[in-house]
Amino acid sequence: MLNPLFNGISRLIGISQTAEPQKIKLTFSQTRIEILAGFTVALALVPEAIAFAFVAGVAPLVGLYAAFIVGLITAVFGGRPGMISGATGALAVVMVSLVSEHGAEYLFATVILMGIIQLFAGLFRLGKFIRMVPHPVMLGFVNGLAIVIALAQLQQFQVTDANDSIVWMGGAMLYQTIGLVILTMFIIWITPKITNMIPGPLVAIGIVTSLVIFGGVDVLRVGDMAIVAGGLPNFSIPDVPISFEMLKIIFPYAFILAAIGLIESLLTLNLVGDLTNKRGGASKECLAQGAANFVTGFFGGMGGCAMIGQSVINVKSGGRTRLAGITAAFFLLGFILFASDAIEIIPLAALVGVMFMVVIGTFAWNSMQILLRVPRADAFVILLVTGVTVAQDLAVAVIVGVIISALVYAWNAARRIQASTRPSVRENSALVYDIRGPLFFGSTASFIELFDIDNDPDLIVLDFAESRIVDQSGLQAIQDITNKYAAAGKKIKLRHISQDCHRLLSRSGQIIINSDDDPEYGLAVDYQIRAGAMGRRH
C-alpha cells in the first residue's frame, strides 16, 4: 500500500521493495549485522528514554527500565521482527498531569491497567481495524511524526545558565554542536557507499565521540543530562489504595495511553512492514504491547510502545530479525549496569545527527508533489493529520483523519445514487426505476427525491440490480417511499433484493418479487423494519 511513499526511505536504507518476503536466515554475517544494529539502537535509546522520563516527570531510570522491559518483550513476541519499542514522547506527554497530581506510583498502576486494555484489544483482534486508516492519514502520520522527532531534538541545543534557567546555546558551543551534527549526518550518508560491514550510525557515533574526546571539544554529552548507572529493576506492586476512587483516577489515563500506544505501534508496524516487505501481525503486536506494559508497571517502568525513529534506525542498520531487538534490550541493560561511564561520554550532537537522519528517512518527501495531484479533500486530510500530530498527539490525529476521510467518502457515495425509468416488460402499465449506487444513511435523502409520486402510474417496480442496500437506513428509505406511494393509492414491487432484505422487508408486508439472480450479501446492520407498510408479498 505504501510502497510509493517509502521509495525514498528504501533507497536511503538500501532495501529492495521487490525483495522476497521470506524468513531471513541467521547466518554468521547476518548475526553480526543484527548484533551491531541492536548496539546502535541501544545507544540511541538511552538519551531518548532519559528525555521522555524528564517529560513525564519521573526519574531517568523509570524511562530506562521501560525501554528495556518493553523493548525485550515486544522483540520476542511482537508482530513484526525489526520493530523497536520503548518509552516514547507520545505517551510521556499524557503522563505529565497524572504524575504531577498523584505521583509515580499511580503511573505504575496506570501502566498495568493500560497493558490489560491492550491485551483485550489483542484478544478481540481489534488490531485489524488499522486497515481502515486511509492512505492520506498514513502520509500525514509519517510527516507529523518526522516533524515531532525533529522538534524533540531542539532541546539538545539548550543549556542551564547560572540561575538554573534553561537557555539556548550560544557562541562556540553552538557552532561546534551544529558542526558535529552535520558531520554525523554526513558519515551516516557516506558509510554505506564505502562498506556495509558496520552500520552507518554506529560508525558516526564512534568517530564523533573520538573526535570530541581526543580533540577536547566542549559540547554536551549524555552524562550532562542524567546519571545512567543503576541496578536491576525490582518487582513491586504499585503503592496505591485499591479502591473505586483510584480506578476512576487511572482509568481515563490508561485508556488514552492504551489507544495512543496501539495506534502508534500498529502504524509503525505497517511502516516497517513496507520497508521489509512483510504483512500481518497486528493482533500479535497488540498482545505483545499489552504484555510488555503489564509487566513494566510491576517493575517501575513508565510503559511504552513502538518507536518509529528507533525502528527505522534498526532497519537502516540491517536489523531484520528478532535478534536485533533482543540485543538492543540487553545492551541497554548492560549500559545501565556496567557501561554507564562509556555511555555518558557520548556527545549529544552525535545522537541528534542520527535522529535527524531518521527524520529525513521518515518524512514522505513525495507528499509535497502528491498534494497538488490528489483530490483536495485528501490533501486537506494529509495537512490536517500532520498538523494535529505536531500540535496534539498521534491518537487524536489519526482519529480526526479517519473521521474526516469517512465523511468525505460518505458524501461522495451519497451523490452516486441515481435512477432511470423505463416501461416494465412483465407488468402492463408499470414503470420501472433502475436504481444505481449504494443505498445507505448518506444517500437516503437523495433516494427519496428520485421519485415522482404524483405522476407515476399505479404500479411501480424498483430494480436494485445495480444497487446495494448497505444498512438499516436504506431499508427504512424503502419503507418510507412505499408508504408514500401507498398513501397515494399506488403499489410498489421490488426486484433484485438480497435474501436478507427479503426476510426483513417481508416481515413488514412489502411486495417483493423473487428473482433467480437476486444478489447474496449481508447488511451492515440486521434491522427489522417496523410493521405497518402497505401491500402484500407476491
Image (cartoon, helix red, strand yellow):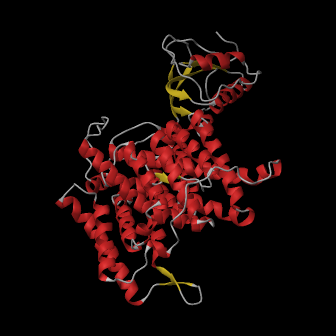
* Of residues 512 and 336, the one drawn nearer to the viewer in this rendering: 336
User: How far across and how far down the image is residue 181, in percent?
Assistant: 34, 74
* Of residues 447 and 501, the one drawn nearer to the viewer in this rendering: 501
Q: Is residue 432 above or below residue 107?
A: above
Q: Is residue 94 visible to the viewer in this orientation of the structure? A: yes
User: How far across and how far down the image is residue 460, in percent?
Assistant: 60, 21
Can you say which quadrant of the picture contains the C terminus? top right
User: How far across and how far down the image is residue 230, in percent?
Assistant: 54, 62
Which residue is at a point 70% across and 57% down the rendered structure image?
105
Q: Residue furthest left?
A: 194
Which residue is at a point 17% across and 61% down the rendered structure image?
194
* Of residues 101 and 134, the one drawn nearer to the viewer in this rendering: 101
Which residue is at a point 28% across and 37% down the rendered structure image?
25
Residue 273's quadrant in the figure? top left
Direction from residue 180 to residue 395 in the image, left or right: right
User: How far across and how far down the image is residue 20, in percent?
Assistant: 27, 37
Q: Is residue 484 above or below residue 6?
A: above
Which residue is at a point 45% across and 44% down the rendered structure image?
75
Direction from residue 170 to residue 9 in the image, left or right: left
Can you say which quadrant of the picture contains the N terminus? top left
Direction from residue 55 to residue 209 in the image, left or right: left
Q: Is residue 376 visible to the viewer in this orientation of the structure? A: no
